[in-house]
Image (cartoon, helix red, strand yellow):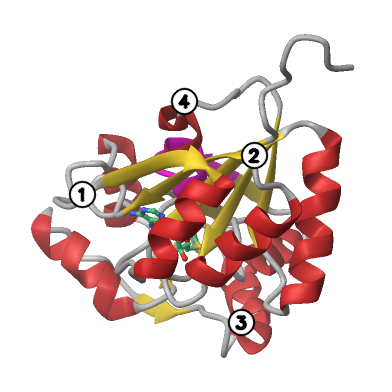
Amino acid sequence: MGKLYLVATPIGNLEDVSPRALRILQEAHMVACEDTRHTQILLRRYEIRAKHLTSYNEFNHKRQVSVLVGQLDRGWDVALVSDAGTPALSDPGEALVAAAVAAGHDVVAIPGPNAAIAALVASGLPTREFTFLGFLPKKSGERRRRLAALIEEGRTIVVYESPYRVDDTLADLAAVAPGARVAVARELTKLHEEFVRGTATEVAARYAAQRPKGEITIVIAPAEATEGDG
Ligand code: SAM
């Protein structure tokens, strides 16, 4: 029986990869990548000649799940990597993991970079309890309702966001929770890494004036309780 390895890869800085991750990529019979060209950049940097590369992404994952479980059945070890960070988090990897578990295969996580955790720990906001959402709904009304309900729960919230929607999302947040505390993490681990911190109103105004470029993770916490509250 083969093993399915979930190999975390860098979210920008190619130095952020563990020796174990590199060894697994070298040794696995097959490496399933969100985008083989993207993964090749990492493999070339570390002079790894993977035995077989195949693509596994949102467009082909339904078909590829049975192909890859078939490889595990014949005893091949399969390493799954996403374009950035930890596979199976907000990407189609989840379906492959569920199928591999259902078929009785071992699934081994090779931990490493993850944008949500990197943004959370450097946000300056409470980390004790948090809710990770992946991506928010694309429609403004739904997004506002979701944000309002989550803020009400009182935990820190971590969301992934596209640079094309970050201004709208922050405007929605400012509408439902103007005093919420926000840290927008952009281009984590890269040359132009940046954190923008402030209240929802302040941060929304900043991004309304200029849409950001690059990869974005947003960390949100309810407004700090002031004396006499609650
Ligand atoms: N599985 C990945 C992980 O472990 O971080 C995340 C996959 S998710 C489809 C991709 C999203 O993660 C991006 O749209 C962005 O919101 C966030 N992200 C990825 N790299 C980032 C970076 N360097 N800085 C900030 N956010 C990042």
Q: Quadrant of the C terminus?
A: top right
Q: Secondary structure at mark 4?
A: loop
- Whether ligand 1 has any atom under 8 Å from the Cβ at mark 2 is answered as no
View quadrant of ligand 1: bottom left
Please say whether residue 110 is one of the residues in the magenta stretch.
Answer: yes
Residue linked to disc 2: 179
Taking depth in this image into account, of 127 and 34 the one nearest to the observer is 127
Nearest to the eye among marks 2 and 4: give it.
2
Q: Secondary structure at mark 3?
A: helix
Task: Point out the stretch of residues depicted in magenta.
Answer: 108-118
Nearest to the eye among marks 2 and 3: give it.
2
Residue placed farthest to the front in the image? 228
| Apparent side of residue 212 relative to residue 174 in the rendered image (left or right) | left
Q: Residues within 10 Å of mark 3 (few under 14, many from 20)?
A: some
Tag of residue 13: 1
Q: Are marks 2 and 4 in contact (CB under 8 Å)?
A: no
Q: Are marks 1 and 2 in contact (CB under 8 Å)?
A: no
Question: Residue 226: which quarter of the image?
Answer: top right
Image coordinates of residue 9 in percent, x first then y, are 35, 52
Residue found 45% across the figure and 77% down from its top? 164
**Amino acid type for the residue under numbered disc 2:** Gly
> For the residues marked 1 and 4, what is the alpha-carbon distance in whole angstroms?
22 Å
Q: Residues within 10 Å of mark 2 (few under 14, many from 20)?
A: some
